[in-house]
Amino acid sequence: MEIRSVHFQASAAQKLANPRLQENLKKLSTKFVSGRANAITELDDFEGTRDAAKERRNRGLQNLDVWLEIFEDNARKSGATVLYAASAAEAAELTVKIAQHHQVRKVIKSKSMVSEELALNRQLEAAGIQSVETDLGEYILQINNNEPPSHIIAPVVHKDKEEISDLFAKVHQKPRLTNIEAMTREAREVLRPHFLSADMGISGGNFLIAETGSVCLVTNEGNDRMCTTLPKVHVAITGIEKVVPTLNDVATLMRLLPRSATGQSISNYFTLLTGTKQPNESDGPEHMYFILVDAGRSELLGGDFQEMLRCIRCGACMNHCPVYQKIGGHAYGWVYPGPMGSVLTPSYAGLANALDLPQAATLCGECHVVCPVKIPLPDLLRKLREKQVEQGLRPWTERIALRVWRWAALHPKIYRWGSRIAVRALKVWAKWQGGKIRQLPGAAGWTDYRDLRVPEGKTFREMYAQKKQTK
């Protein structure tokens, strides 16, 4: 997937001006946010479970190379082939080579954000291999000119039923349906022949279990089971950071993942896949491959951003983010949107390719509060902002303004004097604009989309002193 994060500001402005998108994004708070709030009350000790999940993820990351070796050894014992890819391009190349080796003509795919990193559909099609998305959301996007997902859990959260109904009627060449059950049945009828005729299935991996050499998949539609058991070849593509030591670790993480993602106590389908089809088994792949992708992940180990590798891709941070709730995922310009994407994209693709993303947050802290593995996302965003300043990547006007503010803050008398002038000037400025600060020179990023509150005309110290005298 092409990285377009440098266009964040222009794209965000476009999304804010789209009333249909604004209406569609309300589903985040009415479904996911409220659903999570209800689901976590089912746990006797939610915070204790979060602490345990954080500890288990850290244990895997602290000795990542060891657990990867253990996983590889156990996976190979069960008949699977384990391959490593240093980059997204290498991972895509390996996938194409596997398909060509087995003379694959058609591939069916379960939802995988790592495959979006690889731009895998495009790579397969360039090699003459048909690739069919089978997750309903991903399928809708694929038939809509290969539109990228806007959410890692709900890829089409930005679309409404009417848009999808129009798309189905156009692509399927059938009468337009508006009943959701009828629409899903129509999609099922279109996809079912692909399940039965595909030569290879591709999945992601929510977790890799070192002690068994297994991959864990969490879905709500069951399409992952069709993709991984019907074709003769199964390729699981996931990041190297997804390995956990034991099945007990997965059990702990699964208490949090569906609750944090969609507000479910447990997902509809929880699948553990180990090795190839055995002689006494009725289904399963004859050939199984794991492609473990680095693509920038190992560079985070031992550094300021290692904690980001704990992420279990639940999407809770974006569901609760006030910025994401207003602009959706496409504005972020790459695979991972929201607060997680504002850290991952600069980390994987380079800070210079995602200049605005560390600024695309209010630092309200909500993302940290809801993260099931306690990733301190606001702190990581602040660190990225610091790196931008250190590397001279922020506009010169901003850098000068911050230096002036720093100098004033180090001189309290001057700071107090300047504050008194500023609050009085802003009050007068508001009178000229009809009692509100609708436009403010140098602050267009704020006043283009909101009116600022009018100050009282006095500083906090002045108001505090006045209140103290009246007691």
Image (tube, rainbow, N blue to C red):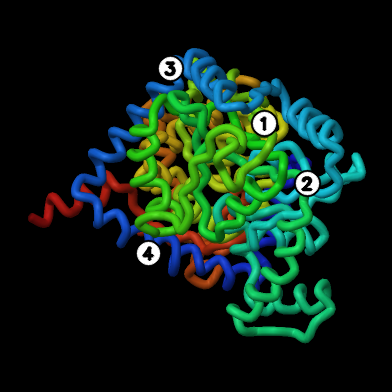
Q: Alpha-carbon neighbours of circle 1 within 10 Å: few (<14), some, or many (≥20)?
A: many
Q: Nearer the viewer, mark 1 or mark 4?
A: 1
Q: Alpha-carbon neighbours of circle 3 within 10 Å: few (<14), some, or many (≥20)?
A: few
Q: In this view, does 437 lie to the left or right of 467?
A: right
Q: Alpha-carbon neighbours of circle 4 within 10 Å: few (<14), some, or many (≥20)?
A: few
Give the residue number, with chain letter if any, for mark 3.
62
Q: Alpha-carbon neighbours of circle 2 within 10 Å: few (<14), some, or many (≥20)?
A: many
Confirm or deny contact between disc 2 and disc 4 (CB under 8 A): no
Q: What element carries label 4?
A: helix
Q: Which amino acid is tagged 2?
A: Asp
C-alpha separation, residue under disc 3 versus residue under disc 4: 34 Å
Q: Which amino acid is tagged 3?
A: Gln
Give the residue number, with chain letter if any, for mark 2.
199
Q: Nearer the viewer, mark 2 or mark 4?
A: 2
Q: Is mark 3 on a helix, strand or loop?
A: helix
Give the residue number, with chain letter if any, for mark 4.
34
Task: Work out whether mark 3 precedes mark 1 in sequence or the reverse, and give the earlier one.
Answer: 3
Q: What element carries label 1?
A: strand
Give the residue number, with chain letter if any, for mark 1.
289
Q: Which of marks 3 and 1 is in front?
A: 1
Q: Which amino acid is tagged 1?
A: Tyr
Q: Which amino acid is tagged 4?
A: Ser
Task: Work out whether mark 3 precedes mark 4 in sequence or the reverse, and give the earlier one.
Answer: 4
